[in-house]
Image (cartoon, rainbow, N blue to C red):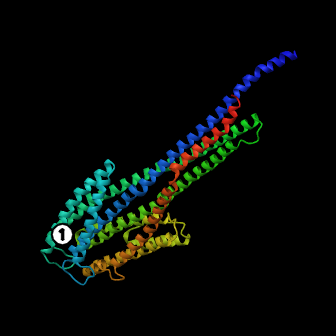
């Protein structure tokens, strides 16, 4: 019986001995394959992140800002055209026809440049159709504007009362601006904003996936390396295999750095898009629509027959900027109560809608709250000026209303509008600078990984092979 058992034991030994190299090779192969998988996951995530940062920071972001800039320029073009027709040769009102035409020409050049840039960057059918509509509409508008100015120059008139022929042509021009040009500009801006949002969502998804898979594959790699270390140590009665320990340490460092990279990139993306750019978009839209509202004031003064239409348009723009329940007559009181509630809630409750409401709900950066509050406060002043100007018109003081509405003297409406505009630009700059920093930081974090990641994986694989090769040699 004992002889039989001994013989059986000797027959098993070669089989067991032959299975050890296979198991070592299998463990080593699993570790190397997991390291290669980590390389593929990391490289894919880095590529997607870099591409997303490039598009958001250097393509789609500038396109959206250019679209808002175009909308602003178009509105101010029409406002200055109305001012030029309204003022005629009248002097001493703070703004002259010559100055209005100078600003008109600046905005025309600015708008033409923005449209040309949009044409060169249009990436889809929606954007291309919007650009085509802009080119056609803007050309027609400029022709009508030139015609209106020519007719106005041929017929001297009192302030606020241009010649009927010039007014008729201006109506065609401003109707074209309102019905074709501005909607096309807004559609272009919305298309670009949608492209940016899609890119952001795709990039965030890619970064989140890379983070998850880096953690999963990294964890499995560490388990495989530990299993190899334990198996080799027990099988060959060694406490520690230095090369496998080095591979494990390298894997820990690489996985930790990879997880930290993608977590940090996700933070940079969120900071750039949600915290900074969403505010930039709301504020630039607020500025563009504010110029539309300001243009409606000029149209209101220029064309009494359409005064009710332009007053309603002004109120509609007002609601887009900072919406509260009510009418134009109750707006100031309702806005004041809403902002009082905002202050009483320690600025946590924002009971206004519109672009300024969106900004107040998205304050993130140092100095932004104070800058946003200043913009809202100056907006209130400008709104009160509007009611004062309309009261002058009702009293029959058209010249006084025009002087107050177009003057840049301190305390007059146009000066208060400029103060509000500067406050909008200031808070926009805070967010724009934060956006630029987040994009730059995100891109900087990726530097070195194109070489560092493959080198790290090669080192892990090399340490694994160095660790198991001497043990395998013992079986030869």
Q: Is residue 396 above or below residue 37?
A: below
Residue 158 visible at all: yes
* Total count of labels: 1
Q: Position of residue 190 (x, y in %)?
A: 37, 55
Q: Position of residue 459 (x, y in %)?
A: 60, 44
Question: Dividing the image into 4 quarters, which one contains the N terminus?
Answer: top right
Residue 183 visible at all: no
Residue situated in front as seen by the camera: 84 or 340: 84
Q: Residue at x 47, y 48 (%)?
A: 48
Question: Of helix, strand and loop, which one carries label 1?
Answer: helix
Asked where in the image residue 323 lies, by quadrant, the reply is bottom left
Q: Position of residue 99 (x, y in %)?
A: 24, 77
CA neighbours of label 1 inside 10 A, class few (<14), some (14 to 19), many (20+): many
Q: Is residue 449 left or right of residue 311?
A: right
Q: Residue at x 68, y 36 (%)?
A: 470
Residue situated in front as seen by the camera: 465 or 391: 465
Q: Is residue 211 left or right of residue 82?
A: right
Q: Is residue 408 left or right of residue 14?
A: left
Q: Is residue 457 above or below residue 306?
A: above
In the picture of the structure, the residue carrying the numbered disc 1 is 167
Q: Is residue 411 above or below residue 259?
A: below
Q: Position of residue 131 (x, y in %)?
A: 28, 54
Q: Residue at x 76, y 36 (%)?
A: 234
The residue furthest left is: 154
Question: Dividing the image into 4 quarters, which one contains the C terminus?
Answer: top right
The residue furthest right is: 2
Asked where in the image residue 61 lies, by quadrant, the reply is bottom left
Residue situated in front as seen by the camera: 416 or 1: 1
């Amino acid at each position: 019986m004992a002889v039989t058992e001994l013989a059986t034991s000797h027959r098993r030994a070669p089989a067991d001995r032959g299975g050890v190299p296979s198991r070592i090779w299998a463990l080593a192969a699993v570790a190397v394959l997991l390291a290669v998988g980590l390389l593929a996951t990391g490289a894919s995530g880095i590529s997607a992140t870099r591409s997303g940062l490039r598009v958001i920071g250097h393509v789609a972001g500038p396109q959206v800002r250019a679209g808002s800039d175009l909308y602003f320029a178009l509105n101010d073009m029409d406002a200055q055209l109305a001012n030029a027709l309204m003022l005629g040769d009248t002097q001493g009102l703070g703004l002259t026809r010559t100055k209005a035409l100078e600003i008109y020409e600046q905005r025309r050049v600015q708008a033409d440049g923005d449209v040309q840039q949009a044409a060169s960057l249009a990436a889809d059918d929606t954007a291309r159709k919007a650009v085509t509509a802009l080119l056609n509409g803007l050309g027609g508008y400029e022709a009508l504007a030139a015609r209106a100015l020519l007719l106005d120059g041929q017929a001297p008139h009192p302030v606020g009362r241009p010649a009927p022929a010039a007014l008729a042509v201006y109506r065609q021009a401003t109707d074209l601006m309102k019905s074709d040009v501005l909607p096309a500009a807004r559609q272009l801006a919305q298309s670009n904003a949608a492209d940016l949002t899609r890119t952001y969502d795709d990039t965030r998804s890619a970064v989140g996936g890379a983070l998850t898979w880096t953690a999963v594959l990294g964890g499995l790699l560490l388990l495989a390396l530990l299993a190899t270390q334990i198996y080799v140590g027990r099988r060959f009665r060694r406490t520690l295999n230095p090369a496998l320990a080095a591979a494990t340490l390298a894997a820990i460092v690489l996985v930790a750095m990879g997880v930290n990279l993608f977590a940090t990139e996700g933070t940079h993306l969120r900071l750039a898009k949600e915290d900074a750019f969403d505010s930039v978009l709301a504020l630039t839209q607020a500025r563009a629509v504010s110029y539309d509202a300001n243009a409606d004031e000029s149209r209101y003064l220029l064309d009494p027959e359409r005064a009710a239409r332009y007053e309603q348009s002004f109120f509609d723009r007002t609601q887009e900027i900072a919406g509260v329940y009510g009418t134009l007559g109750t707006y100031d009181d309702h806005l004041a109560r809403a902002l009082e509630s905002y202050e009483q809630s320690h600025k946590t409750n924002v009971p206004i809608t519109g672009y300024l409401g969106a900004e107040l709900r998205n304050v993130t950066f140092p100095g932004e709250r104070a800058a946003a509050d200043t913009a809202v406060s100056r907006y209130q002043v400008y709104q009160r000026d509007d009611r004062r100007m309309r009261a002058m018109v009702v009293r029959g003081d058209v010249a006084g209303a025009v002087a107050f509405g177009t003057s840049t003297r301190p305390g007059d409406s146009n000066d208060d509008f400029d103060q509000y505009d500067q406050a909008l630009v200031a808070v926009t700059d805070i967010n724009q600078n934060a956006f630029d920093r987040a994009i730059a930081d995100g891109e900087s974090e990726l530097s070195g990984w194109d070489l560092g990641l493959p080198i790290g994986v090669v080192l892990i694989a090399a340490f694994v092979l160095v660790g198991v090769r001497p043990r395998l040699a013992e079986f030869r």
